[in-house]
Image (spheres, rainbow, N blue to C red):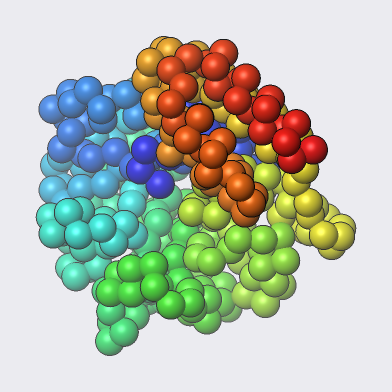
Amino acid sequence: MEDITDPPFRTLCKRLGADIMYTEFISSEGLIRDAKKSLEKLDMSREERPIGIQIFGHNEESMIQAAKIATQAKPDLIDINFGCPVKKVVSKCAGAGALQDIPRLLRITEAVVKATHLPVTIKTRLGWDENSKIIVELAEQLQDIGIQALTVHGRTRSQLYKGVADWTLIGRIKDNPRMYIPIIGNGDIDSGEKALEAKNKYGVDGVMIGRASIGNPWIFKEIKQYLNGNTDPFVVSINERVEICKEHIERSVEWKGNIRGVNEMRKHYSNYFKGLSHFKEFKIKLMECKTPDSLYLVLDELQNYYA
């Protein structure tokens, strides 16, 4: 979710039903060296709360210092990412790379817990590969260290995002009588129906939505609808798509300025209007726009075309 879940997008997700937000993950090394991009990721708005700052790294001392810096930004919690499978992160033994060295993973976690007065949560995976699915045991160890919640993605690092997420071990964590902290499931939840099934079948305390929210911030509203017993088909009209896209543009420009705000919205249009026939010509026009007003005009044209 790097370069996607910035404050403008998070605010939309929150307004449309997300209960808790997380920042983009922040490199501990970048944070302690005052890297501009890392420091920028500490930005949060009041509308997003409760929100956690997510940090990652492989060096215990750097993670301690990063946790202290993040604490000063006054989030509601600190989250450690031990789940990112991307090669450039894993190659440094960070993210899911930490699953190759559980003693160090536990030392880093304990150090961060002691470095902040805020609740500390963890996001991780089932294990490094098919032969090392250690999450049930690891969950107990992390709880004993003092984390306040655990999110588990139902794949190993070796799987990346391929295949189907396996929630079986997530269910086993919930069935463990020693576990009392909230367990949040993650992986392949892209509809209200799947979220409800995960809750009923595996007993999770919540679900974390990542990729399924891109261009679809309504998914949180859909899930809430299902969890509240309304299983009617969830449909988003073209008018709603356009209005939310406009709001996203407005928030992006407000947060980043005209040039950067307009440019960085370009990665979102295909997702907001996914599935529309003949969208290509409108996408070309949107990509060529250089001002918010010109974007709004193209979006009005698009709305009229599909109305």
Q: Kindly give the residue lying farthest to the bottom in the view shown.
A: 131
Q: Is residue 206 in view from this perspective?
A: yes
Drawn side of residue 60 relative to residue 160, left or right: left
Q: Nearer the viewer, residue 33 or 273?
A: 273
* Residue 152 on image: x %, y %: 45, 64
* Residue 229 on image: x %, y %: 86, 60
Q: Tell me if residue 203 comes above or below residue 7 in the rendering.
A: below
Q: Nearer the viewer, residue 62 or 307?
A: 307
* Residue 291 on image: x %, y %: 48, 14
Q: Quadrant of residue 52?
A: top left
Q: Quadrant of residue 103?
A: bottom left
Residue at 25% x, 67% y is 99
Residue at 40% x, 29% y is 264
Residue at 12% x, 55% y is 92
Drawn side of residue 236 relative to residue 285, left or right: right
Q: Nearer the viewer, residue 62 or 96?
A: 96
* Residue 231 on image: x %, y %: 84, 62
Drawn side of residue 40 relative to residue 184, left or right: left
Q: Quadrant of residue 247?
A: top right
On-image quarter of the C terminus? top right
Q: Total of numbered circles in the picture?
A: 0
Q: Tell me if residue 119 comes above or below residue 7 in the rendering.
A: below
Residue at 50% x, 65% y is 187
Q: Is residue 144 in view from this perspective?
A: no
